[in-house]
Amino acid sequence: MAEDNHAIGIDLGTTYSCVATWQADHVEILVNDHGNRTTRSYVTFTDSKRLVGDEAFNQAGRFPTNSIFDTKRLIGRRFSEASVQSDVKLWPFKVIEGPGDKPMIVVTHNGQEKQCSAEDITSMVLEKMRKISETYLGSTVKNAVITVPAYFNDSQRRATKDAGISAGLNVLRIMNEPSAAAIDYGLNKKA
């Protein structure tokens, strides 16, 4: 696959994510392999495979303790934070305290228990979004802008950028979601 200079924009959501690129003087929201413009922000570990996106969501009922979602609520946070402790009680998957008070997600994959950080899981979702764009564009994609909530602190932004780098992306910018919405409005405003 040839490398191109396309940059993609990834709206990294808690429940759904989407990816877009600029083409023919407009923003093109790309469809995934199921024909959807949004992709579930899910990762499921089966007995033998790692599924990401809609496939992962579709298998969540069969593998509830190995189906990971809502990692945006964990990324860049400390295990001891009250909000993390509140969320942990609601999820079917196990979250434990890792080194440095980092939340670690416990999954079983290929018969072995392993620990993943929120950054690891987020990286898998971002990699899926990168692959969706590469399929659409027919070329390798490296450059990306990733949106995060305006309330994300520096630690959460840094962790999101690290996840993007782990997904093989050159993260050009971490952008606030409201700023991205304002830019979209400005681009699409009728004169």
Image (cartoon, grey):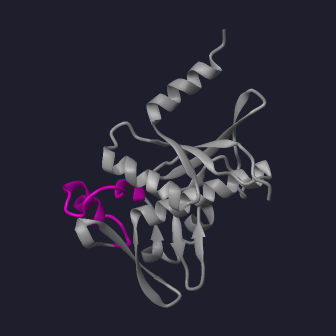
**Along the line of sight, which residue is nearer the eye, 101 or 107?**
101
* Magenta residue span: 71-94
Quarter of the image with the N terminus in it: bottom right
User: Could you say where residue 89 lies in the image, as x and y percent from the top left?
Assistant: 27, 66
The residue located at (60%, 79%) in the rendering is 49
Left or right, residue 44 beside residue 36: left
Q: Is residue 164 magenta?
A: no
Quarter of the image with the C terminus in it: top right
User: Could you say where residue 15 lies in the image, as x and y percent from the top left?
Assistant: 48, 53
The residue located at (58%, 19%) in the rendering is 186
Left or right, residue 67 beside residue 32: left
The residue located at (40%, 40%) in the rendering is 149
**Is 112 located above or below residue 149 in the figure?**
below
The residue located at (28%, 72%) in the rendering is 98
User: Could you say where residue 61 lies in the image, as x and y percent from the top left?
Assistant: 51, 72
**Along the line of sight, which residue is nearer the eye, 5 or 133?**
5
**Is 114 located above or below residue 74 in the figure?**
below
User: Could you say where residue 116 lies in the image, as x and y percent from the top left?
Assistant: 41, 72
**Is 10 located above or below residue 186 in the figure?**
below
Q: Is residue 84 magenta?
A: yes
